[in-house]
Image (cartoon, rainbow, N blue to C red):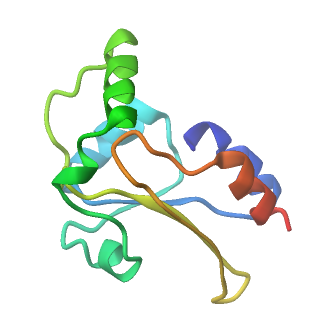
Amino acid sequence: MAKQAEAFEERNARLVVIGNGAPHFMTAFREDTGYKGNLYTDPSLETYKILDLKRGVGSLFGLKSLKEGIRAASSGYLQTEIQGDALQQGGAIIIGPGDILHYSYQNKEVGDHPPIKEMLKVAGA
């Protein structure tokens, strides 16, 4: 999504990333992804619980996660340490204007990502 931040801004939308790792991992996340926007961390996982995001061993192992691992390794990226709760999956939501939830996506497994085109369409509506 870091590469799409400008497209969201053009639609008057603001990206906010909430990770679950320790605060000192935020610098490495920015360097690895190029993300320059709002970045927070919630090691307590309360945000993830409120959004009912998936968590568990089953989400670590699947065809998509295997493919993503191979793709990352072949691109020269090897995970050297776990940055947060490895069992916790992420997701994406679009809120507002106001406090209206317009979009919600729950990652099913490692390597699963929300469809950016779909999110941009909702953000531009």
Residue that extends furthest to the bottom in the rendered view of this protein: 99
Q: Which residue is drawn at 36% across and 10% down?
A: 74
Does the image show residue 52? yes
**The C terminus is located in which quarter?**
bottom right
Q: Estimate the x, y position of residue 96 in percent, counting from the top left.
A: 69, 80
Q: Give me the residue at 15% from left, 27% from top.
A: 80
Q: Measured from the top left, where is residue 119 in percent x and y? A: 69, 57
The answer to whether residue 61 is left or right of residue 30 is left
Residue at (19% x, 46% y) in the render = 83
| Direction from residue 31 to residue 5 in the image, left or right | right
Residue 63's image quarter? top left
Q: In this view, does 23 lie to the left or right of 115?
A: left
Q: Quadrant of the N terminus?
A: top right
Vertical comparison of 78 with 25: above or below:
above
The image quadrant of residue 42 is bottom left
Indicate whether 85 appears above or below 64.
below
Res 31 visible: no
Residue 12 lies in quadrant: bottom right
